[in-house]
Image: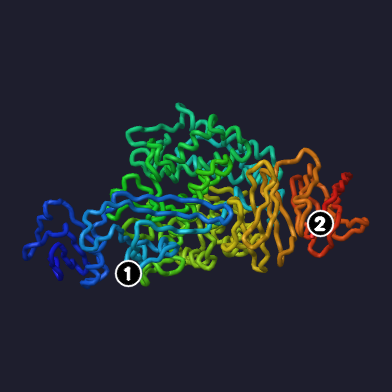
Amino acid sequence: SSPTIWYNQDEVLGITVEGRHYGVFAPIGSGWTGDASQTSSLNGDGYLSIALLPDNSESTLQYFRTYAYAFVTNSKVSWTYDSSTSLITTTYSYETQLMDSANGIKNEVLSALYRHLWQHIQEAALSTTYASPRGTMKLFKGNKFTTQLKFQGILPTIPDVGDYNRELLLERVKQVASEPLGPGPTYANGKAMGRVVEVIHIAEELDARAERDQLLAKLKTRLEDWLTVGGVQEYSYNADWNVLTGYPSGYGADREINDHHFHSSYAIRAAATIAQYDSSWASQDQWGGMINLLIKDANNWEREDERFPFLRGYDAYAGHSWAAGHGDFGDGNNQESSSESMNFATATFLWGAMTKQDEIRDLGIFLHTNEMMAIEQYWFDVHNDVFPQSYPHKAIGMVWGGKGVHATWFGADPEFIHGINFLPIHSGSLYLGRHPEYVVENFEEIIAERGGMPTIWKDVMWEYLALSDADRALSLYLSDPNYTPFDGESRAHTMHWLYNLKALGRPDTVLSASIPLYSVFIDEMNDTTYAAYNVESTPQDVQFSNGFRMTVPPNSMHSIRTQNGEVVSTEDLPEIPADYGLHNFPNPFNPITQITFTLPAIDRVTLTIYNALGQEIQLLLNERLKSGVYTIPFDGSRFPSGIYYYNLRAGSFSQTKAMTLTK
């Protein structure tokens, strides 16, 4: 339809087209002429700016005119991670060229912020709003804004605290270890490697070192084949397109540069798992350099490295990645599997952490934390503020630039539409449980849409449900012993995940830790489990934001469960020690010290505290433990200053050491 011109004075037009209001700003001193159409000479300057206005008032038009001549010439995003607070600070900035400085014109930008941005900016957004496919956008004035988000930590695996049949779990680990891990296209082979990664961690927790090493050897063979030119699998760099592509490919990853962050996420996470156990394999002069290139191909963090575009896959303003290499659709680009994008972020974080490359680690934190917020708003609408009120679904399967759809590229079954934004489920997926009530609503919608329980991706659905209601998920699992596993899953991992979440409870969204490899869980009785992994070669003192502290042994995972702040159990995932060991830190202490001991074999262990007279004052531990490194806190707040002794007994071994409490 023809535009309605409701303002025409000097260089400024106010027009309305099909109910949408615009301001058109020509160079100052020029004018507009005409009736049905308007023409301006632009004073020969060859530029103008157009603004989408929230209304058609003259005051709004004049307000936008003030900022209409600050032309954006570049935009940048940067980020910093503070491990002491677990905060990731993201800075978004505009570079501008001021086209005219007359009549109070300002060199500042007016921009509209998506919901995930204006919810977390440190500056103030304006009250002016716009409607969009991503919900309400808010106007912001300025050339820079920042957001701060809490990184909720990622572990290599979840703690081993489940009350399951360990012999049965070991059988399932051995089954996976006996299976071949052959070649295949990047995505299918990646899922196969991801399946093995989870079982490696379970084997470690079960002390099944032979199976663990067997599975690690399979991963090494497969990745080394991928990272070596020639043969049935290889990566090839195309300098014309600045892209690294795996062959055999699939899903247009080669022809259209689609899905690179999806495909490579599995290989990077496999490499991170190898690096956890074999740092030399992961060194830059061995295989690590190629893994860094895989990360750069999908999301290059170094602007000066022109072999790859900066953040190819991740859209910093939209807050999430895009999947289509060309993005040449009427509705813009799209992303289906937000969870596989998060798999890339998880893999990047773990690779950076395990290889002590902080820039890469922090890239993973930046991606994981920011995209988590976008997923909650735009895929799941966890606060019921984004989807139209009449929209009949709790989740969408694909986010497009101009729309969101309850669909997938590969099938219309509700399990696909919902599940493609769950999988692969692992320790980096705990973000899915940040809103436990929503998890149940999402799961119930799958049942309602199907007219019954899931039948295709049952294990994926159970694992998702367990993030909110592990008892129900475990019951469904136990009632269906002959289910068919998803091709990226194993019976070992599903069993491990469900039983452990039943014991751990839900992910805690409040607490943070002083190192990035951590998780916190809280159960229905408000018992809290603190878990952390130490990548360093010396013990690390980890402090949580509520003041709880624990010492994590080197190259180990350690967890402590508390009831009302009192320690009730511990769990470790270390290397097998060669001998017994016993020490405490700090010493002297006030009032808490951490007593660490090593156990080379399964045995019953007692840890007892004595005063200077040799009187027993506290029994800290009396239980049967597997081999490993353990840390138990001793709180001396109710005892007077002085010298105390701690004694470790394990079988025929006994050792006593002194410690000093100073107040």
In the shown orientation, is residue 346 left or right of residue 26? right
Numbered circles on residues, count: 2
Q: Where is residue 124, by image quadrant?
A: bottom left
Q: Nearer the viewer, residue 426 or 184?
A: 426
Q: Nearer the viewer, residue 286 or 205?
A: 286
Q: Residue furthest left?
A: 34
Disc 2 is placed on an element classified as: strand
Percent from the top left, x then y, of residue 260?
Answer: 41, 43
Percent from the top left, x then y, of residue 483?
Answer: 57, 54
Disc 1 is placed on an element classified as: loop
In the shown orientation, is residue 339 left or right of residue 567? left
Residue marked by disc 1: 128
Between the residue at mark 1 and the residue at mark 2, the CA separation in whole angstroms equals 60 Å
Q: Quadrant of the N terminus?
A: bottom left
Badge 2, how many Cα within 10 Å: few under 14, some, many 20+? many
Instruction: Residue 69: tell me if it is visible.
Output: yes
Amino acid identity at mark 2: Leu
Residue marked by disc 2: 661
Q: Quadrant of the C terminus?
A: bottom right
Q: Are marks 1 and 2 in contact (CB under 8 Å)?
A: no
Q: Residue furthest top?
A: 230
Q: Nearer the viewer, residue 499 or 87?
A: 87
